[in-house]
Amino acid sequence: MRFLLAVVSFCLAFLCAAVGVGQRTLWLGPNSHQEQFPVEASEKYTLVDAGVLAYLPGGQTLIARGEGDLFAAYGRTSDMVAWLADTSYNHVVVEKVDGEKKIVSSVVDPVVVEEEPADETAAEPTPTPEATPEGEVAVEPGRNPAGSDLWIAEFTDVDSLIQTFNLPAEMSVLVAADGTVPAPADISAKWTLDNSTPMAGPLMVAGGVFALIGVVLYILGIRHMRRKRGPRRRGLPPLPVTEPLSLAEIEEAEGKGVISSTPKKTERRALVALPLILVSSLALSGCSPDVWPQAGNETPTPTPTPTVIAPEDQKAPVLLDSQATRIMTKISEAAAAADTSLDAAAAGERLSGAVLEARSVNYTLRAKIAEYAAPSAVPANWTILLPQAADTWPRSFLAIYKDDSDTTIPPVIMMATQVDPWANYKLTYAGQMEASAVVPGLAPADIGATLVNPDNQFLLVPPNDLAAMYSDIIENGENSEFAPIYDLAGDQFRGQLLTKRQESLDAFNTTAAGTGEMTFASAPGTEAPVALATLDSGAIVAVTVNDTESPRSINADAVIRIGDNPVLTTLTGVTEASTGFLTTYTNQLFFYVPAQGSTEQIRLLGYSSSILKSEVLP
């Protein structure tokens, strides 16, 4: 019976081990699958839809091979389609062909926007491309996709570009060279397939266990047979005639070792073989997690946290945190380089509007006045981010940076805008925050905020009218019609402006009293306001307000001299004038404007002021 059980155990051991090893050898499926994309080789761009990368489950690896520099980037599909709208490109998608999903490619033609002429006489035929001396049509140079702020991330390599992705459904991948030569035609995707065999390990271990049991049963059977003196299938032969033995013969027989020790040696060899069999089975099973059932993959229980739910019709935010950090770094680096070289053209690559105007004047003054102060540096990071939620242009984002390591540095509030898909974000507004400023409730960066229309009537004051309102408050203070809805007590900028005006007037009257006069005025700037909604249906609004001071002569024989003012002398090119001067300062202002019906007041959050121009009065 023991031998029969041993045979059964050995058979089970062989079966388990064979199935386990077979799962990792003969029946093991492929660990990856690769598909080639059928793209047009002459196109400069190839857009790979996210559905293509999700064609099979598992890790997504994009492989592009060509000559020279290769480029790939991923971002929102809508952004990439907008960036490619004015050119043709390969579009790789997944479609049903004969009832089966297949990867197909088609060439998308550029979108042509026909502009109607102002009148019939202005209508002119569209000019045709100029021909080269050889008779070939000149082709417009391509646009390099590298460095666009639309991309969430971009990658470059030479001759071969291999990149792994795990993209959601609303994102796609753009593949190109440098925009001037065709994109690589050899593009494929590779998916990592799950070929794990979680039962292979247990089966091979079970085979080792059954082999061990079989060996033990076999040894027990041998020992049992030895003890029973072997099987007795026939009768014993007749015993020989016995003769008496002497005690010396018995002792001599015992000394020669009549009792054999062979069974003990057999048992030792078998016991030595047991660990070898067990170690072999464990070695075959391996330590790879692919051959064992995985435990501990339960989804952790989430901890409830306060959330902000975006409206159903709200679009996705125009950028992610990583994009905002990269954009702010580029803006900061461009501003720092321009501040060092005093190059307004270089500053214009990343600055615009009131920020660029202020820096351009600063560069002019610093080129002539050695001790003139440089503008404040642009932070390369952000602490609070509020991107616009939109899929159209122009689009903006608000950023606030606070230096936690140095509390003496006031926080900086900034607004950046991207005018179209082919332009990068440029800093349009920047200012230092009030010491007592309280930032209203803002939506998280992954939800974003809607852009408030300039004529929005659901705020206490529409963004278009905010600069005029503040100009009236500067001039009239508590007597302004807007004083009841404005927080005058928390406005430090107005107090500084009025103090500066009084100091300038006092200095002027010391020499020009009776022969001249100095007047001051405030008026809205030319920059369009930018407003992003807050959680309480209010808005943070950025505007510009220009402040002017004008010393002028009221006596025909008198002149206004500014020889002791190097700033005005540099900007006007003269030291005196019989009529007078008009100096304009531009002020970038950030306000919090509550919604209609709110009990809160409009309050100033931050500001910056700089000289804009100075000219001789006519």
Image (cartoon, rainbow, N blue to C red):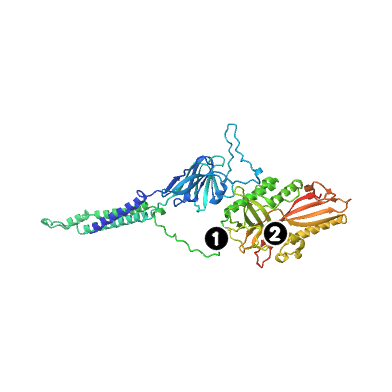
Q: Earlier in the sequence, mark 1 or mark 2?
A: 1
SS assignment at label 2: helix
In the rendered view, would you say 130 is above or below 521? Answer: above
In the rendered view, would you say 81 is above or below 506? Answer: above
Identity of the residue drawn at 82% across and 57% down: 505
Find residue 170 and report its horizontal and vertical position in percent.
52, 53
Q: Amino acid at mark 1?
A: Glu
Find residue 176 and report its horizontal and vertical position in percent.
54, 43
Find residue 201 and report its horizontal and vertical position in percent.
37, 54
Q: Amino acid at mark 2?
A: Asp
Q: Is residue 142 left or right of residue 408?
A: left
Crowding at dot 2, Cα within 10 Å, few <14 / some 14-19 / many 20+, comes out as some
* Relative depth, front residue between 184 and 408: 184
Q: Is residue 197 left or right of residue 267?
A: right
Q: How many marks?
A: 2
Q: Residues at badges 1 and 2 in contact (C-beta under 8 Å)?
A: no
Give the alpha-carbon distance from disc 1 to disc 2, as whole Å. Answer: 30 Å
**Label number found at residue 348:** none
Would you say residue 287 is visible in this rendering?
A: no
Residue assigned mark 2: 465
The extreme front residue here reads: 120
Q: Is residue 90 left or right of residue 8?
A: right
The extreme bottom residue here reads: 599
The extreme right residue here reads: 557
Crowding at dot 1, Cα within 10 Å, few <14 / some 14-19 / many 20+, comes out as few
* Relative depth, front residue between 524 and 277: 524
SS assignment at label 1: loop
Residue assigned mark 1: 312
Find residue 288 and report its horizontal and vertical position in percent.
41, 53
